[in-house]
Amino acid sequence: MKNLNETTTAENQKLNSQINASATKNNWFSADGEKKEFSNELQTIEKVDLPNQLSKYYTEYSLTGFDDIYRAKVGLNIAISDVFNIYRGDERKEGCIWLGSLEKSLNAHILAKDERIMLIVYNEHTLGFVFPYLPNNCQILHASILRGATKTDGSVYINPSDKVRLASEMDFENFRCHFGSFGNEKEYIYQK
């Protein structure tokens, strides 16, 4: 049940994970506050049992399919934009920004290593771009008030209920913007 346009490209699959616009807020938690486990064909997240004295402070997860990240420690009172610890195969520890779910946070962290800027269409009324280090902010290139935009310059925060998809050259034409240098695949991720 995703609002993102279905495509087969790897970039869109990563974008889908990074900016999961159809996810409900904190969908990683069940109604009673207990954390859920996650699994799909390529990635798995399993909760690790910890001694009582440690389980008061954080939850530890065993991971597969998230690049070389094999473990995550998430604080029990974590909030959006807080940092939690992840561990890579070479025993390196890194900080990862919490984006509402463990899957979304890990995929955004992996994609951010790409360091390319994503060109997106936000709620079908705004053409913009997303920096890899600010995955929930859409920098506005052009917004159409006639299509429902309420802000025409600066940036907008991407909420879980927003519809986001990769922009194409046709979107630039529809928004009457020049595609030109945005076609550089070394700097930008876009729908081809």
Image (cartoon, rainbow, N blue to C red):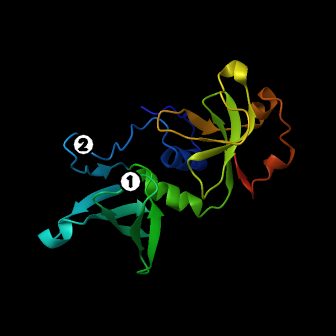
Residue on which disc 2 sits = 30
At horizontal 40% and vertical 69% (from top left) the residue drawn is 86
Seen in the image, is 142 located left or right of residue 4?
Answer: right
**Residue positioned 19% across, 43% down in the render:** 32
* Vertical placement of residue 151 versus 138, above or below: above
SS at circle 2? loop
Which residue sits at x=21%, y=49%? 34
| Numbered disc 1: secondary structure | loop
- Outermost residue on the top side: it is 146
At horizontal 65% and vertical 54% (from top left) the residue drawn is 131
Kindly identify which numbered label has been placed on residue 142: none
**Looking at the picture, does residue 154 appear above or below residue 134?**
above
Residue neighbourhood size for the residue with mark 1, other residues' Cα within 10 Å, grouped as few (<14), some (14–19), many (≥20): few
Residue type at numbered disc 2: Ser
Q: Quadrant of the C terminus?
A: top right
Q: Which quarter of the figure is the N terminus placed in?
A: top left
For label 1, the residue is 79
Quadrant of res 164: top right
Residue 172: x percent and y percent?
78, 34
- The amino acid at mark 1 is Ala
Q: As rendered, which of 168 and 102 lies closer to the eye?
A: 102
